[in-house]
Image (cartoon, rainbow, N blue to C red):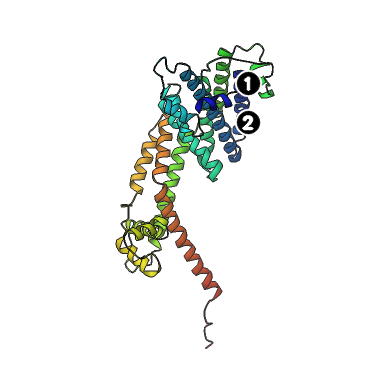
């Protein structure tokens, strides 16, 4: 099946055309980054991600083809299960193969996976990431140059049918005199130099955005404490636990918990039962620990490590941040509704003496 898949899909461009197409996208990406505007940055990440994925996929195909040539005569150098999985649509197996084949270092491979997720969230989910988007796009651009330089095609080919855009001509001319094995390495170095010249603020931007994220949640917790209406008031830990409980009550997981443990699933009984039986998973006030993580991030000088810390924090705290944000938004909406109601019905006018 896979051999047929390979034969059906490997009738594509020469290596000259392939590299020329990547130059086209990378040069267009530089134009977007030079604008320093969030929507252009978002487009730049999409372009760079496409270059990385196409190059990694071509590496997968080359590796698979080489593995099939030695099949039955020698032990394969790579896991055939991973190879076959990498031939599909999933992105991570392509990165894993590049890491196993030593095309990419572990640090670069991890950063590519993180940046690919940023691209997906920005493109599909509409997440903005505006505070770090420009720096991330430049960093991903530099990594893409590394990927292109690390890719070693099984053969160097060109054709009279190759079509080179005006962007590509700026780097390699008409292509007639190009020494494919050496001149493209100079192109990737040149692109990387231009990308680096756009500035590197990744470490500062990641730190600033993480600090802003922590302070926003801290303000939300303080807002919940300051506006708590319980008779004795609640501590920060208590309002966080209440926020998690309220979130669980209205979630599918909370409903499933009640069903699995024989509790009611509707009406006031459901809410009372959940308060008595649901065990909150959030323990204590997270802010001090989060600030320690911020210090750890700011102590980094390696961009790959800093990105790993930042992405790990955002992933690990995503649920808790969502719970607190939802509780604060609900309380603010309630307060605003009470203010609006008071404005509409100011009560009886005072009697005239």
Residue 185: x %, y % from top left: 55, 16
Quarter-of-image position of residue 77: top left
**Who is closer to the viewer here, 31 or 280?**
280
Q: Does residue 252 appear in the picture of this structure?
A: yes
Residue neighbourhood size for the residue with mark 2, other residues' Cα within 10 Å, grouped as few (<14), some (14–19), many (≥20): few
N-term-proximal mark, 1 vs 2: 1
Q: Residue at x 46, y 35 (%)?
A: 114
Q: Which residue is mark 2?
A: 31
Residue neighbourhood size for the residue with mark 1, other residues' Cα within 10 Å, grouped as few (<14), some (14–19), many (≥20): many
**Who is closer to the viewer here, 158 or 232?**
158
Residue 157: x %, y % from top left: 60, 15
Q: Residue at x 45, y 41 (%)?
A: 208
Q: Does residue 243 appear in the picture of this structure?
A: no
- Mark 2 falls on what kind of element? helix
Q: Which residue is mark 1?
A: 17
Quarter-of-image position of residue 308: top left
**Who is closer to the viewer here, 59 or 305?**
59
Residue 120: x %, y % from top left: 52, 39
Quarter-of-image position of residue 14: top right
Vertical comparison of 30 with 346: above or below: above
Q: Horizontally, is 193 left or right of 176 in the view?
A: left
Q: Residue at x 53, y 76 (%)?
A: 346
- Mark 1 falls on what kind of element? helix
Q: Which mark is residue 44?
A: none
Judge depth for marks 1 and 2 and give the one in front: 1
**Who is closer to the viewer here, 3 or 67?**
3
């Amino acid at each position: 099946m896979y051999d047929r898949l390979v034969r059906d899909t490997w009738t594509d461009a020469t290596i000259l055309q392939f590299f020329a197409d990547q130059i086209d996208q990378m040069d267009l990406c530089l134009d977007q980054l030079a604008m320093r505007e969030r929507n252009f940055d978002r487009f730049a990440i999409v372009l760079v991600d496409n270059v990385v994925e196409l190059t990694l996929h071509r590496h997968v195909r080359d590796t698979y083809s080489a593995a099939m040539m030695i099949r039955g005569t020698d032990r394969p150098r790579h896991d055939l299960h991973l190879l076959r999985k990498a031939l599909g649509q999933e992105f991570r197996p392509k990165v894993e193969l590049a890491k196993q084949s030593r095309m990419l270092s572990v640090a670069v491979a991890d950063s590519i996976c993180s940046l690919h997720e940023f691209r997906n969230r920005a493109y599909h989910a509409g997440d903005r990431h505006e505070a770090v988007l420009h720096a991330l796009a430049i960093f991903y651009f530099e990594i893409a140059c590394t990927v292109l330089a690390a890719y070693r095609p099984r053969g160097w080919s060109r054709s009279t049918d190759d079509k080179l855009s005006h962007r590509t001509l700026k780097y390699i001319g008409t292509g007639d005199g190009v020494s494919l094995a050496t001149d493209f390495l100079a192109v990737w170095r040149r692109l990387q130099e231009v990308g680096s010249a756009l500035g590197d603020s990744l470490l500062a931007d990641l730190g600033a955005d993480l600090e802003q994220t922590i302070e926003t949640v801290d303000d939300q917790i303080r807002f919940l404490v300051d506006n708590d209406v319980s008779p004795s008031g609640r501590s920060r830990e208590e309002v966080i636990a209440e926020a998690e409980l309220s979130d669980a009550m209205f979630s599918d997981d909370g409903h499933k918990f009640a069903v699995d443990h024989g509790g009611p699933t509707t009406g006031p009984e459901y809410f009372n039962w959940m308060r008595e039986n649901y065990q909150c998973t959030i323990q204590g006030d997270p802010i001090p620990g989060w600030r320690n993580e911020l210090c750890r991030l700011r102590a980094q000088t390696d961009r790959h490590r800093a990105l790993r810390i930042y992405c790990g924090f955002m992933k690990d705290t995503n649920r808790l941040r969502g719970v607190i944000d939802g509780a604060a938004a609900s309380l603010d909406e309630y307060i605003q509704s009470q203010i609006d109601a008071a404005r509409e019905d100011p009560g009886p006018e005072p009697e005239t003496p």
